[in-house]
Amino acid sequence: MAAARHNLTRRDVLGAAAGLCVGDGRLPTVPSSAASPPEQPQAAVPSPWTRALAAFRRAEAHLGAFRRYEASLPAAARAFPACEPLEERGNDLESARLARLRTLLRAAAPDLPALAFKIALAVDDEIAFFSGGDLCLAAVKADAQRLCGLPSANPSA
């Protein structure tokens, strides 16, 4: 009951505003500095690295959830030919993860820990053997040179 007394209606707000009127019927003036709302900090725009990392982690999570679901099925559901839709879905999710991995590896690493993470992913996934893997490795090389303060061997990198 006490909470209901503290809920303001539009009528309450308008009534309070009418009560502020002064002798000539106008609302009192407020200094312009007080009238403007305080400046809100600008929302930080995520970097390409941050966006690519988040997309890669989502793709990995989707694939992991699917693999756990697949493992929970009875053996008959995982046997051929019943497993064909499962294999297609798993392949689609793995392809999406690999696409996000390529995007992540091509994004500029902001620091050395990010570069180390990129190298680990490239090695663990054997990225050199996939299409576009050479571009990913070239981006990793360019990151290493940039973060070490070395000039890039490739002027377009």
Image (cartoon, rainbow, N blue to C red):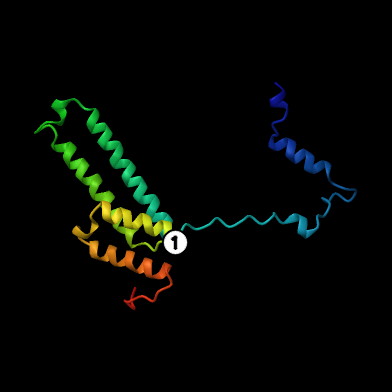
Q: What residue is at 70 percent from the left and 34 percent from the top?
A: 8
Residue behind mark 1: 110
- Amino acid type indicated by mark 1: Pro
Q: Is residue 2 left or right of residue 146?
A: right
Residue 109 falls in which quadrant of the image? bottom left
Nearest the viewer among 17 and 129 is 129
Q: Is residue 71 left or right of residue 151?
A: left
Q: Is residue 131 left or right of residue 140?
A: left
98, above or below 152, in the image: above
Q: Where is residue 9 shown, x and y percent of the image?
A: 69, 34
130, above or below 9, in the image: below
Nearest the viewer among 94 and 37 is 94
Residue at the top extreme of this rendering: 1
Q: Where is residue 144 shown, x and y percent of the image?
A: 37, 66
Q: Where is residue 134 shown, x and y percent of the image?
A: 24, 65
Q: Where is residue 126 shown, x and y percent of the image?
A: 23, 55
